[in-house]
Amino acid sequence: MTNNVPRVVIVGAGFGGLTAAQSLAHLPIEVTVIDRHNFHYFQPLLYQVATAALSPADIAWPIRGILKRQKNTAVLMANVTGVDPEQRLVHAGPATIPYDYLILATGATHSYFGHPEWASVAPGLKQIEDATAIRRRILMAYEQAELIEDVEERRRLLTFVVVGGGPTGVEMAGAIAEVAHHALPTEFRRIDPHATRVILIEAGPRLLPTFPEDLSAYAQQALERMGVEVMTLSRVTHCDERGVDLEGARIDAGTIVWAAGVIASPAAEWIEAERDLAGRAKVGPDLTVSGRPEIFVVGDTAAAVDETGRTLPGIAPAAKQMGRYVAEVIAARVANRPRPGPFRYRHQGDLATIGRKAAVVRLDHIHLKGILGWLFWGFAHVYFLIGLRNRAVVALNWLWNYLTYQRGARLIVDGPDAQQAAQAEKVKPLESSVEVSRSQTNMAGQDWR
Amino acid sequence: MTNNVPRVVIVGAGFGGLTAAQSLAHLPIEVTVIDRHNFHYFQPLLYQVATAALSPADIAWPIRGILKRQKNTAVLMANVTGVDPEQRLVHAGPATIPYDYLILATGATHSYFGHPEWASVAPGLKQIEDATAIRRRILMAYEQAELIEDVEERRRLLTFVVVGGGPTGVEMAGAIAEVAHHALPTEFRRIDPHATRVILIEAGPRLLPTFPEDLSAYAQQALERMGVEVMTLSRVTHCDERGVDLEGARIDAGTIVWAAGVIASPAAEWIEAERDLAGRAKVGPDLTVSGRPEIFVVGDTAAAVDETGRTLPGIAPAAKQMGRYVAEVIAARVANRPRPGPFRYRHQGDLATIGRKAAVVRLDHIHLKGILGWLFWGFAHVYFLIGLRNRAVVALNWLWNYLTYQRGARLIVDGPDAQQAAQAEKVKPLESSVEVSRSQTNMAGQDWR
């Protein structure tokens, strides 16, 4: 074993970690990438998996496959449970891995503003598993509604609440409305999917708060044209299995999607670094944490600031730029070259899609909306996918989707456990309710179709 | 409600049930199709989902989508728990559905020859969920092996046992060997996937017992060339989490796939019909059960015999022919026309694929093998898929697979519950074993890579 070769351990193979690994490809070092999944995925299209337009495999790639030609790099699938910064060790399942340089790129998860109990009733959209769970809820709502007679309960099942008016919330609300009004209407015999209510709730005064005001206004108009009810200046005070409470109002709903808050993964805790309010590790201009020049933090779990003191946004381009920068710093140190200057973030623009022929794009001083924004958004996303196969499959699915209004991945499958859990969760309350027993009698007697 | 319109209820939307529904499209009747899934799937390609070549959505279609233009047909997603043949009612979740004609097409499941406890350690391959569970096991075996030091345990994890030498067993063994020898070798740094053992166990004297002997011999040679160890005349006497016992031998294995026995779904029990040993309902020449001219049974859950008294095989073409025939009988009865003659099964041939450029095909007196059989098999399967999108996606995936040796759907995802269950199941025994603690120390000290 060549013990003089510097060892770099990267925890997390999202945009930041993977870019760092790829940027270290040709150095005389040993790189180990650890992730709890065996795949890297393209988070910006997760909402399309959640709304049955794409399959998980369309937007994900095995990490090993991406890095296999990189001879200095090993990949481990393991759950990292902690770091020992004194001994310079990472604890990952049955293995303990020493490092000379550590890059933490473990991302972020949903924040329920001090109400973790809302997580089970209002899933967020960060992981592939979140997307398939939300897909199952959306599709099951229609299946359940078709199966029962109770009009109130049907109405509840066909009400979808999306909490949070950022890009993810806007994209989810638009996509659910498209499923309801385009993909499903001809397929049900008892319920009318056009009766679906999609309600998008935003605490602030406008949707897409990080976008220019004209694009926010356009997004709201476009969503309303699609039948989405947009409620700004509305704050969710409670979530439960049957709906949400706002300040002074109750919305009964069958499905709640959480797109409101984000909190960093516990990486900062592992290394006992200083944190900001969102749990992100505060990093210096070279993206290391204070007092640990060998530990870098990148992406959504880093609280990095730009020259003006503003915290960088938690988006893919920022994570990639940080990953690339950290690789440069390590390369310089390994080669005993002078270090690069401080990290500088270059904001490339903001994109959000609303639905068919409607998206908003801001690139420096250019604002695009409508069909032009939508085409730009589509080409940009296909371009950023990895590999010819996924680009072709996604483009083919989108073309088919556009021409037929159909969605190709409308399967309710999630492994037998999840399936049974969902069944138990959703069917049992109905069976025991009085209204349903009554309606059962009706159905058996004469009222069935 | 038009109560004079005859009501046909179809339970199960596999090949038999779906074909029956489609054949009833233009009749003045009310058709209700009930399935516990919201999709129909193409079972012959399930092994490709299990071995990460295809995604579930590539071989499955929402039942509602397939039948949406059929105005006389409603679809319900519900678990049928029983039938009341006296009252002519089907119990399906919260709903109770009356019928005038009932078609039971509920298929078959695995049989463990009186050892249902083997099911959890040796999953079979019937449902989409089975395929994703087996995929997870296969891929996790390599991930686990890469993570540990213990040589014996690594060897066990890289040993795959397939029980049953029929088409499914042959296809699974061949596909696992391809994954091991073509897709994975360059991606691991510590283990060598070429060290994988794939063992195919068949109780009878030859593989593919329903095929002509020359094709059986070819299949065995082709598998052995791919590195599969074929053991004929070998009977499994016990399965557990760490391997299988044969008569007089033990094989330690990380993954066991069950492709041996089949038993019918409980449909025959619901209607208290006479059953054969595999639990199938005995049906007369018009595919109704004795004494119930309004109840038809089709597909794998029917024990139908041909003119010579042989029970029909449990394959897709037989199920489809039965579904079509039953629709004709119902159409004749509804129109008060003379009934069609007895059901006649027409055997179209047998197909099984082994791997790249190797398959066996028997069509009447034509036997194909090698690349010719493989091309025939590929075109036939793409042809039988439903819809342009899935044909294009599957063909594209196969082409990519063929050119690159890669597999596009190599994700370990199954919803958070299944994921955690798998982790708990697989990782914990390792953590607590002495060998691994020892190796951990080694790794932390110096032995890592």
Image (cartoon, coloured by chain):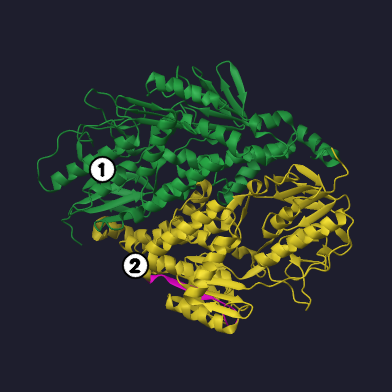
Chain colours: A green, B yellow
Instruction: Left or right? Give the position of A107 relative to B17.
Output: left
Three-letter amino acid code at the position of disc 1: Pro
Work out which quarter of the rendered image holds the C terminus of chain A and state it. Answer: top right
Task: Give, as a single range, the part of the protein colored magenta.
Answer: B195-207
Q: Indicate the quadrant where residue A425 lies.
A: top right
Identify the residue under disc 1.
Answer: A85
Three-letter amino acid code at the position of disc 2: Asp
Tell me which chain the residue with mark 1 is part of: A
Name which residue lies at 62% across and 81% down: B365
Please give the label number shown on residue B396. Answer: none
Residue B206 lies within the magenta run: yes
Tell me which chain the residue with mark 2 is part of: B
Q: Position of residue B158 (x, y in %)?
A: 42, 67
Q: Which one is in front, A119 or A187?
A: A187
- Rendered view: B347 above or below A213: below
Identify the residue under disc 2.
Answer: B192
Q: Indicate the quadrant where residue B279 lies.
A: bottom right
Q: Position of residue A309 (x, y in %)?
A: 24, 23
Work out which quarter of the rendered image holds the N terminus of chain A and state it. Answer: bottom left
